Amino acid sequence: MPKLSSAGTMEPTTATFFDLVRDDLPDVEARMRRAPDGGPSRLEGAIEHLLKSGGKRLRPTLVLLIGRMLSADRDSLINLAASIEMLHTATLVHDDLIDGALVRRGLPTLNAQWTAGATVLTGDYVFARAAHLASQIGSLPLMEQFARTLMVIVQGEITQIFRDGNPDPRQAYYDRIYAKTASLFEMATRGAAMLSPVGDGGLEAMRRFGYHLGMAFQIVDDSLDFIGDAAQVGKPVGSDLRQGLITLPTLFYAETQERPDLLASLQNGRLEPSEIGTLVEAVRQSGAVDLALEEARRTTTIAETFLSGMPDTPERAALYQAARYVVDRTL
Amino acid sequence: MPKLSSAGTMEPTTATFFDLVRDDLPDVEARMRRAPDGGPSRLEGAIEHLLKSGGKRLRPTLVLLIGRMLSADRDSLINLAASIEMLHTATLVHDDLIDGALVRRGLPTLNAQWTAGATVLTGDYVFARAAHLASQIGSLPLMEQFARTLMVIVQGEITQIFRDGNPDPRQAYYDRIYAKTASLFEMATRGAAMLSPVGDGGLEAMRRFGYHLGMAFQIVDDSLDFIGDAAQVGKPVGSDLRQGLITLPTLFYAETQERPDLLASLQNGRLEPSEIGTLVEAVRQSGAVDLALEEARRTTTIAETFLSGMPDTPERAALYQAARYVVDRTL
């Protein structure tokens, strides 16, 4: 399986699909760091910290690979990739504040160091920077998509807070991970196609590729939360469930054990921490996590079908690899 | 002096400059309320509440008057006006949360009713709606300006939190009110000109009109905080100072009394609440508030000079009235 170095970049020997964009990603990073306003150094320091604790840059990589496969303008792709990663970063700042998370990827979160007020405002500033990058792409339809995607992401979180999503637990879960993850993947993949000379069919194929890949990515994330070890994942095993968040493995567990009462108890916060600890272990021991990972693999296979009609280029081959990586990764 | 009804709209007898946009403002309101995503009713309810506790719609009125004076497309103006008022609304949501304000214009704030997390996210959603409205204007330069203005506003607040602004107290004050208020006025007035067939000279004149008007508006706000009665202003007299915020009347007081030590004591939070109460009364009794209001009048006069080269239309006459209203208002 591919291994990640502590800096969050792929080891060169395993993740060949990152190789194709090795010369582009540094430009994306530089674009994200370039303050259009010569902002105060305190904010630049915060942004540097946030970008350092960033991840694998999978979303920018998808943008770059699809755009290159479809002959999009490089500079526009760099701006799109940077704006999407910046938007992702902004949502994490407010998420970590709301969740009270103190560590992300081994580095302290902003809210672990600053007051709530300063953290809210820094998140707002990162949103503004993301919107500014999006405005640099030079496409009004993409700008609109950017705003719509932000609406979807935030609405998903609000639905989660107020627990007024779909009454069907499985559908509520799919709605939530669409809002949380797949919507931005969609924007990355469809957005790259929008910058390319393709028709509506190509746009829709790339949207669906991103949608399914994003859904699979989040299902894998939610599964790794149960099986990864704490040091690797950077948070305690079963942390979602410990925070009252019901993800696919727990849903499969409740379904296979025929324990619908379990979901109600979790939703109403009626379980003691010790009971939840026992439940985490039970989910781990059951086949529920494997069932979830199987679903992620099936979802990735669906995603891959939308690549088949695309130009047969090294980038397309890399996109197949990226799809495999999404389900085979361990972090 | 003009009086405001409880709904925040102008009494027709006094505020004639609002008359010219009487048929346009309802369209701006409708545009702000129109959910592009058929969003969940809970969020629509929150937006309805926020828009109800909104103010006089001075910024949209400036957009509409300038745009009409300069023959801009009406639909683009409505979108610009709505996006600016929505951006203003979004910043207030996070401001009230950070300041712990429980009431705005006589209505409970969102954070008085919801958790901090839900309030942060609702503010984010309103930002997204504002960005979506901005994307509907159909102008990439305006979209960029939108993102830049948001950066300026947020940076101003962060500078205030960390108290690392200009070491000169007066300059720090001007920088702060530019970020807080004048930057968005500028965007409104210059933005309306950007939608109109005018050259760079016209754009710059309208930017300066907005800049000076916005500076005057905030100086008047900061002065009314000392002289208004609590019921009318909706917060205790001298509330800025009580929260440690040094505004122009206090600066003039410290200067005329030759009390530079006062500013240092305030900045370092070394004054007891009773001492601050005494100080509020002293500022009120001194001529400092009048000095501040005089400065606001002079600033408005400068703003007006940028109207002189504009087309001699009823809208221009209304803009002169609006400028007078900014300094003569009591709320």
Image (cartoon, coloured by chain):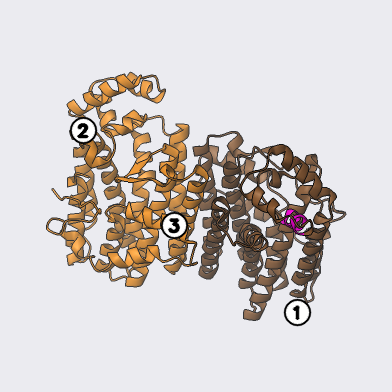
Chain colours: A brown, B orange
Q: Amino acid at mark 1?
A: Gly
Whether B26 is drawn above or below B48: the answer is: below
Estimate the x, y position of residue A145 in percent, counting from the top left. Answer: 55, 66
Can residue B126 be seen by looking at this rendering? yes
Residue B236, image x and y in percent?
A: 28, 34
> Which residue position is annotated with label 2?
B289
Mark on residue A309? 1
Which chain contains the residue that carries disc 1? A
The span picked out in magenta is A248-255
| Left or right, B95 with reference to A17 | left
Badge 3 amino acid: Phe
Residue sitting nearer the eye, A84 or B35 = B35
Q: Residue at x 70, y 62 (%)?
A: A215
Mark 1 → mark 2, Cα distance in angstroms: 72 Å
For label 3, the residue is: B146
Is A108 magenta? The answer is no
Question: Mark 3 falls on what kind of element?
Answer: helix
Please determine if labels 1 and 2 lie on a single subunit.
Answer: no
Same-chain check, marks 2 and 3: yes
Residue A110 sits in quarter: top right
Q: What element does badge 2 sit on?
A: helix
Q: Chain of mark 2?
A: B
Note whether A227 is above or below B190 in the view shown. Answer: above
Residue displayed at 74% across by 45% down? A238
Q: Whole-Å distance between the Cαs marked 1 and 3?
A: 39 Å
Chain that bears disc 3:
B
Q: Amino acid at mark 2?
A: Val
Residue B103 in picture, x, y percent from top left: 34, 42
